[in-house]
């Protein structure tokens, strides 16, 4: 079967009788099993997917199918799906099955998407390489000696390697966008609060946002349209009406675009990544858009601010995993205190333990003002400056990641180097604005390079339309 790059292509073949949903599911399950060494999926919902495919084929035949009929989706192992295992790629939740379905997942199912399985990720979404999973790393399909990025690494690889059409991940500080960049696919982080977080395992609640990994901008737009909107189960979700994103993908406007000069002067920025992004910048200028360099003086403060705040929130959020309520319980405990200690020591991996300890430290009475309070103030400065720039410019463009996909094990001994992989993605997370990574080319090793765009809060229609415009222009010029 040919490789499909959008739901539109699939729906065309479903309509003309060249394809059925059962054949589509069969194709993806065959690919998942054939490419098992990529370790993208932790579990395939095989029989369930076939059953759902048959139901949707019947609906297509009688004209009652939903918007997503023909869409086969994988979900990151941090999203609740009733009756299915949910582990956040951690042993602390070994044996746990979800008692309910996340709002975002339920909305996909209601529109006849087929959920084909749960995907590998960094444990509790903590990582930039997918090397922190207790099930082993997912591997980049372009070069299996390299990482796919993280934490939604399995989700990105699944789309990259044609194991599903799209994936639903989570983005705390770049965990959808950075792996999308490494794997050559589209990664969208919507405005904070645009999609309900009900049913998403919490890492850092004021940052976490469900995001989309897809092969096309049109599919990302349609999935956002289905998942977004108010939810009685989430008091933090936006009450704004949801636009018809999928119907607003044409862009004929001339935009004012800022590129953050400080990013391109960063010592850690790979020369080929820099040249590729600046090439797109020049292309946009030649096409008549106003493109200017802008200053952002807080670049050096973003990663420290992000990690102080997210580890503090993780310390609080992960306190519920204690061996008493659900999931893993140490068999070596002798009393309540040892139950807590041994369960957490045995169930959590090294990176999660590191972040819990760091978060507990910054929240301690002696250091709360010195670290946590100060980081909150800096976050406010970063948000205000980002919003100020976006009042003057329609978009900000910058690299998604400072390098292309690095080798497995290259940064594991140096947590600081690993954390700096997020240097360009955390700005949108700290400011709560929408951002997208789109693939714009490859380096001399054949590895994907991603361009990141940010825009004003709740301006996803223009972000998606402009991203589509850039990809079309790159394709035409190529």
Image: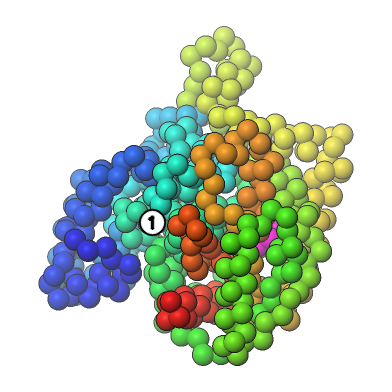
Give the class, few, some or many, for how many residues have Cα within 10 Å of label 1's Cα (few <14, many ≥20). Answer: many
x 61%, y 67%: residue: 275
Q: Is the magenta stretch mostly helix, strand or loop?
A: helix
Name the image quarter holding the C terminus.
Answer: bottom left
What residue span does the magenta drawing correspond to? Answer: 427-431
Q: In this view, does 1 lie above or below 82?
A: below
Residue denoted by label 1: 160
User: In the image, residue 467 lies at what x, y percent?
Assistant: 51, 75
User: In the image, residue 447 lies at what x, y percent?
Assistant: 47, 56
Q: In this view, does 464 lie above or below 157?
A: below
Can residue 457 be seen here? The reply is no
Q: Which of 260 and 124 is in front in this view?
A: 260
Return the residue found at the far top.
Answer: 334
Can residue 416 be seen here? The reply is yes
x 87%, y 34%: residue: 366
User: In the image, residue 246 lies at what x, y percent?
Assistant: 42, 77
Q: In this view, does 366 lie to the left or right of 432?
A: right
x 84%, y 50%: residue: 374
Q: Is residue 115 left or right of residue 181?
A: left
Name the image quarter holding the N terminus.
Answer: bottom left
């Amino acid at each position: 079967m040919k490789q499909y790059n959008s739901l539109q292509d699939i729906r065309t073949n479903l309509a003309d009788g060249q394809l059925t949903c059962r054949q589509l599911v069969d194709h993806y399950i065959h690919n998942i099993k054939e490419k098992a060494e990529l370790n993208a999926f932790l579990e395939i919902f095989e029989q369930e997917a076939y059953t759902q495919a048959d139901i949707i084929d019947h609906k297509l035949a009688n004209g009652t199918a939903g918007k997503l009929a023909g869409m086969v989706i994988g979900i990151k192992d941090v999203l609740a799906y009733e009756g299915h295992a949910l582990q956040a790629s951690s042993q602390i939740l070994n044996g746990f099955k979800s008692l309910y379905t996340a709002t975002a997942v339920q909305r996909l199912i209601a529109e006849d998407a087929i959920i084909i399985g749960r995907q590998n990720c960094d444990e509790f979404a903590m990582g930039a390489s997918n090397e922190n999973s207790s099930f082993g790393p997912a591997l980049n399909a372009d070069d299996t000696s390299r990482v796919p990025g993280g934490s939604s690494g399995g989700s990105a690889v699944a789309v990259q390697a044609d194991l599903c059409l799209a994936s639903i991940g989570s983005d705390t500080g770049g965990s959808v966008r950075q792996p999308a960049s490494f794997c050559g696919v589209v990664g969208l982080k919507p405005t904070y609060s645009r999609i309900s977080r009900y049913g998403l395992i919490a890492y850092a609640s004021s940052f976490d946002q469900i995001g989309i990994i897809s092969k096309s901008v049109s599919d990302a737009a349609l999935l956002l349209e289905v998942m977004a909107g108010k939810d009685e189960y989430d008091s933090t979700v936006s009450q704004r009406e949801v636009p018809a994103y999928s119907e607003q993908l044409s862009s004929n406007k001339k935009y004012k675009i800022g590129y953050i000069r400080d990013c391109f002067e960063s010592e850690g920025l790979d020369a080929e990544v820099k040249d590729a992004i600046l090439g797109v910048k020049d292309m946009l200028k030649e096409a008549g858009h106003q493109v200017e360099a802008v200053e952002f003086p807080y670049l050096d403060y973003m990663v420290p601010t992000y990690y102080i705040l997210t580890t503090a929130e993780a310390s609080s959020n992960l306190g519920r995993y204690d061996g008493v309520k659900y999931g893993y319980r140490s068999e070596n405990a002798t009393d309540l205190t040892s139950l807590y200690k041994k369960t957490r020591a045995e169930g959590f991996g090294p990176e999660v333990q590191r972040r819990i300890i760091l978060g507990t430290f910054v929240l301690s009475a002696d250091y709360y003002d010195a670290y946590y309070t100060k980081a909150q103030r800096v976050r406010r400065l970063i948000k205000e400056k980002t919003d100020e720039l976006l009042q003057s410019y329609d978009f900000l463009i910058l690299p998604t990641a400072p390098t292309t996909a690095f080798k497995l094990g290259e940064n594991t001994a140096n947590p600081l180097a690993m954390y700096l992989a997020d240097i360009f993605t955390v700005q949108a997370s700290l400011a709560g604005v929408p951002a997208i990574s789109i693939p714009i080319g490859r380096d001399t090793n054949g590895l994907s390079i991603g361009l990141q765009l940010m825009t004003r809060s709740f301006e996803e229609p223009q972000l998606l339309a402009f991203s589509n415009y850039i990809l079309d222009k790159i394709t035409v010029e190529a």
